[in-house]
Image: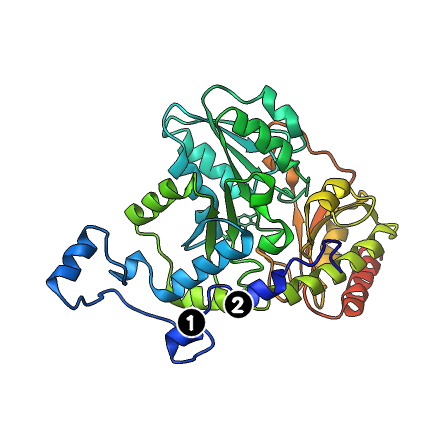
Amino acid sequence: MSHRPHDHSATRVVHAGRDPRRFLGVVNTPVFRASTILFPTLADLERASRGEYDGLTYGLHGLPTVRDLQAALAEIEGGDAALMVPSGLAATTFPLLALANPGDHVLVTDSVYGPTRRFCENHLRRLGIEVDYYDPLIGSGIERVLKPNTRIVFTESPGSLTFEVQDLRAISDAAHARGAVVVLDNTWATPLGFRSFDHGVDVSVHAATKYIGGHSDVLLGAIVANARTFPALSRLWTDTGVTPSPDDCFLALRGLRTLAVRLERHQASALRIAQWLKARPEVDEVLYPALPGARGHEIWKRDFAMASGLFGVVLKPVATSRLAAMLDGMRLFGMGWSWGGFESLMIPTWPERVRSATRWQSAGPCVRLHIGLEDADDLIADLADGFARMSA
Ligand SMILES: *Cc1c(COP(=O)(O)O)cnc(C)c1O
């Protein structure tokens, strides 16, 4: 169902970061809970204090459950190494802190995840780091807004709420020519949908809370980096003590093993439902790059191996009370934040509230759908009933 040649990605998600021989044959790396790790000799402890010890040193520095997840995600996406942090938001903000210094300039896509923007406004500026936002569709035009002190170009593709697909190759070529690094929030596509490091990305961050965890029961972030950026990221990770709990990493590893099959189903159902929605009289536009004819479809087709099940819908103008009649009565679609779990979700969104470099204008209200693993026919029936309540 992917239009890409066979790339072994389903095999990689099953086997990466897993070696049952280390754990008495146990298939999954167990949950290792530890603060203290005992050293056999003084010489070993001394080596550990110099950072020259091969074994485990202290719970905070990484336990097998955490390390195996990091190794798996680095291998699957094609980065050099990965770091886990306690939330997706910690993952998006961490590279900004680790890689930019006072006096530096950071460029951030106008379609960025709202809380990442809030971090830039409240904290990068406070640290004396300049922030500008740019049109997500800028492509090679990024050249015109890069400054001599631009250190980071922060991208997110497709963008939060509005799903613009960014031309990562054009952006990273221009950024690298000026000495800047490219950070990508790759949560939507996951490492299976977009192989960041093949497109010039230096740091790929993920809310593992979403598809990697996959079951709406864990908060976790991943930072996958190349050799150029990893040392600075790793230093800040060690110095700030933000290692997540081994229990959460266990859940993410468990989720990861089924990521390929879940995504296939999310994508297949989302495509069907997006097509169905596009033909509805209540719908003005479907914002789903995987849908032929949708905005961003050409670049998506060129660069992505697959899509996930999250997309936006612009409705024709309709009163809020009518939208409420639809949303309040959904049987299968839940109304709540986050996404990437097995269940379907539907929420209203207000993209125009989180823009500064561009303007977002739409005919009617915007909603965002996460298509879960239910039968697509049942989801379509739920939506059809919803539209009937809306028009009643
Ligand atoms: C949800 C999300 C995050 C943050 O993840 P949390 O684990 O909820 O902090 C970051 N980026 C994007 C694109 C997201 O959708």
Image-based side of 250 in relation to 292, left or right: left
Residue for badge 2: 15
Assign a secondary structure to mark 1.
Answer: loop
**Residue 120 seen in this snapshot:** yes
- Disc 1 marks a residue whose amino acid type is Thr
- Disc 2 marks a residue whose amino acid type is His
Q: Identify the colour scheme used.
A: rainbow
Q: Nearer the viewer, residue 79 or 342?
A: 79
Spatial separation of the CA atoms under disc 2 and disc 1: 12 Å
Q: Position of residue 326 (x, y in %)?
A: 75, 58
User: Do the numbered discs 2 and 1 sit on residues whose CB atoms are within 8 Å?
Assistant: no
Q: Is residue 375 above or below residue 85?
A: below
Assign a secondary structure to mark 2.
Answer: helix
Instruction: Please name the residue shown 73% across and 48% down the image.
Output: 320
Image-based side of 48 in relation to 326, left or right: left
Q: Which mark is residue 151?
A: none
Quadrant location of the N terminus? Answer: bottom right
Q: Residues within 10 Å of mark 1 (few under 14, many from 20)?
A: many
Instruction: Please name the residue shown 71% across and 68% down the image.
Output: 331
Q: Position of residue 384 (x, y in %)?
A: 82, 62
Corner quadrant of residue 144: top right
Q: Position of residue 136 (x, y in %)?
A: 64, 33
Residue for badge 1: 29
Closer to us: mark 2 or mark 1? 2
Quadrant location of the C terminus? Answer: bottom right
Instruction: Please name the residue shown 30% across and 47% down the image.
Output: 240
